[in-house]
Image (cartoon, grey):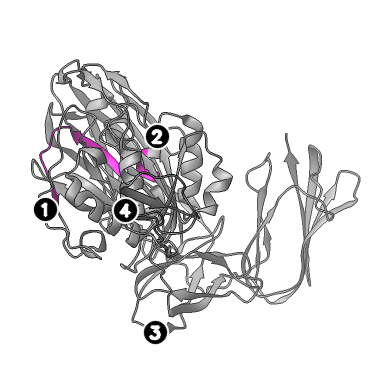
Amino acid sequence: YSIENLPFFDYDILVRAYHHVPVTMTITINGPSVTQNFMLDPTNGDILVIDAGAGREFAADKFDEKGNLIASGYQVPENRSTTDMIADLEYAGYSATLADMTSDPAEWVLYDMLVVAGGASTTPISDAGFQTALTSFAAAGGHYIVEGGEVAYVHNGAGFGADVLHVQSWNGDSSGSVTVADAAHYVMSVPNVITGPITVSYAGYGDQDSATPTADAEMTGAWTEGSSASVITYDSNPAPQGGQYVGFMFNYSAMDAAVRGQLLQNAVNWLLALEVGNCSVSGTVTLQGEANHSGITVEALPGGGSTVTAADGSYSFPGLYAGSYSIRASKQLWSVGSVDVTLEDGQNMTGVDMLLTPVQEMSDCSQPALAIPDADPAGVSDVMTLTLPDATVANVEVFVDITHTWQGDLVVNLTSPEGTTVVLHNRTGSSADNIYGWYPAELAPEGDLGLFAGEELSGDWTLFVSDNAGADTGTLNEWCLNIEYGGGGVSAVDTPTSYELKNNYPNPFNPSTTIEFTLPQDGDVSLVVYDIAGRVVNTLVSGNMEAANHSVVWDGRDTNGRQVSSGVYYYRLTSDSFKDTRKMMLVK
């Protein structure tokens, strides 16, 4: 390179190249020719920084749902957090590229991670299409930071707030300084030791948010005012050296410039850490009474991924990290199996086996007519005791009938006999009246009812309801549980005493139906579907089967995989000394 015709002077020379660390050097031009060479090191990572703020805006007065003033309005400056974060990232040895919310999500995978910067904007991450794209990016395992002083207020609870930002609830604005909640966490200790408190200037409510993280995330940084999170971290696997998400609940540009770069470097270092597991888990999952055990979904939770079983029921999870996992097995219309394991470094655990049984249902209701005390977080609880020895939960549905004059005051939780709590409702719905309907068929739960799968059914199920603000009253009228379960005291060696072909369910059906039959002895069996003209539509079973209760699903397709038309069909079971035919109807 060469630069001509420079007057004698001191110059700051900035040298930049894609995927390399920029170099800035002061050079004195004091002669006719000065030579200076540069060596650029490769970057530590390539980062896409997305400006998710609203630009220069006026923030109006901020009110709560009942009209009380939370914070006064003010003029919000343009988002500087993108500029400041890019400068600090490049100083730390990363390549940073600036984009906005119109950037193509297909190109995000070209970068090592994303930084989504809301800054002081009071309407951050406002584009619905961008929210959808970021949700998909997170679900696919992408690594990202989300920053902004009003992000948690605008996005919390179910959906984007919980799934992407891992914010359960917003708790307030002006909260003081950032402190360290978990000094051992890598975001607070590697490579820079963060001690705190760290000053975050407060010019308006776009500069600070205090929040409660979801149950699967961690409060790594707190605030000096209160006990809410200023930094939230989420790790999708048990290895602590790296993670998937870091949330800064503040305007980055308002933080002490002497420390913020160190915190950002720690966060990026943690998110880009290479984690290679040297452990494994393997075993078999079998279906009671079946000869073919393929297609069972087996998961290693959290963060170990999923696989499906082979015909003999075998599965394996290589490459796991040392730590604790729940190995969970499931298949539609079968019970859910779950085994908790703890892996030591380098351990290859075998023989983690499970038996799944056909799903059955149990329903029960309670009509407590309990008054819900106003503005009392202690709330009220009602207990429903279920008894079914050896039954394992496969799926839970909950009906709730609550009369109340302001949904936004209410928290509703369901707790299982094993102590697992799932949040059904968490102060959403604003001024809407009452909560009435089935979770999850009619109402969307805040938490995941799937957390109950694999637990024991028997014991005390508790519904908790609390009113967390003043001036509204209500009553817990009724609640019901509908639980699909496996087991229920049926031994894997129980053998039927007679042949039986049962009515399919549902009937009529669309798009699939279940056919159950029992065999008192081993033998060759066929189960064939015919149309009304007696032509073979599909053969569902053909071969030797053991004596047991059996269940087969027909998906409404013929032998060539084509969807059949609406109409009446027959299914015929044939064994050594038994034949029976029943009718079913497909309706579209």
Left or right placement of residue 432 versus residue 230 in this view: right
Which quarter of the figure has residue 21?
bottom left
Local crowd size for mark 2, using a 10 Å CA cut-off: few (<14), some (14–19), many (≥20):
many
Q: Which residue is mark 3?
A: 346
Residue occupied by mark 4: 30
Q: Position of residue 56 (x, y in %)?
A: 33, 23
Helix, strand or loop for disc 4: loop
Mark 4 or mark 2, which is nearer to you?
Answer: 4
Residue 489, position as x, y percentages in the image: 42, 66
Q: Where is residue 177, by image quadrant?
A: top left
**Between marks 3 and 1 in the image, the one whose residue lies nearer the viewer:** 1
State the residue at coordinates (56%, 47%).
Answer: 107
Report which residue position mark 1 lands on. 196
- The stretch in magenta equals 161-180
Towards the viewer: 385 or 471: 471
Q: CA distance from mark 4 to mark 1?
A: 45 Å
Q: Check residue 117 for magenta coloring.
A: no
Identify the residue at horizontal 63%, vertical 73% (top origin). 310
Picture quarter with the C terminus: top right
Q: Report if residue 359 is visible in the image.
A: yes
Mark 1: amino acid: Gly
| Amino acid type of the residue that numbered disc 2 sits on in the rendered structure | Ala
The tag on residue 52 is 2
Whole-number angstrom distance, CA of label 4 to CA of label 2: 46 Å
Q: Secondary structure at mark 2?
A: loop
